[in-house]
Image (spheres, grey):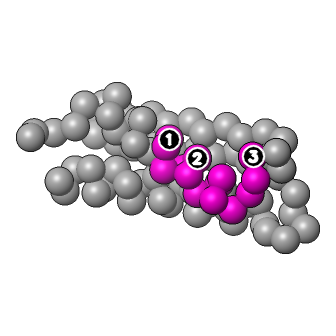
Amino acid sequence: MGEPTDEEVVETAADAAEGVVFSRYKQSEVTDLDVTVTFEDGILEVDVYLNAPSDTRDPEQVADDAALTARSAVDDLFEE
């Protein structure tokens, strides 16, 4: 199948990150979500900003988990 395209890498990472956030918060609870993914020269950068209620979950931890999941999803993409 070959190497995934840069676009596939970015889409996979962004989808994975958003999936984590919306698995932990209802969409209506999320005030702001910004997932920034870049993939250049084989280097993946994922940044997740989340503004959501902290009464039941720590938004910073959810954002960190989302970024880690995005990286893992891209690793899996390259292993296929």
Name the residue type under label 2: Glu
Q: Is residue 28 left or right of residue 47?
A: right
Q: How many marks?
A: 3
Residue ID for mark 2: 18
Q: Which stretch appears magenta? A: 14-27
Vertical placement of residue 26 versus 8, above or below: below
Q: Is residue 48 left or right of residue 45?
A: right
Judge left or right: residue 2 versus residue 73. left
Chief secondary structure of the magenta portion: helix
| Residue 12, x across and y down, in percent | 40, 42
> Foreground: 68 or 29?
29
Residue of label 3: 27
32 shown above or below 68: above
Residue drawn 25% across and 31% down?
5
Q: CA distance from mark 2 to mark 1?
A: 6 Å
Q: Looking at the rendered structure, which numbered label has been put on residue 14?
A: 1
Q: Is residue 35 magenta?
A: no
Question: Can you give x and y, in whole percent of width and height, for residue 1 in the image?
Answer: 9, 40
Whichever of labels 1 and 3 marks the residue nearer the N terminus, that label is 1
**Discs 2, 1 touching: Cβ within 8 Å:** yes
x and y percent of residue 40 in the render?
34, 32
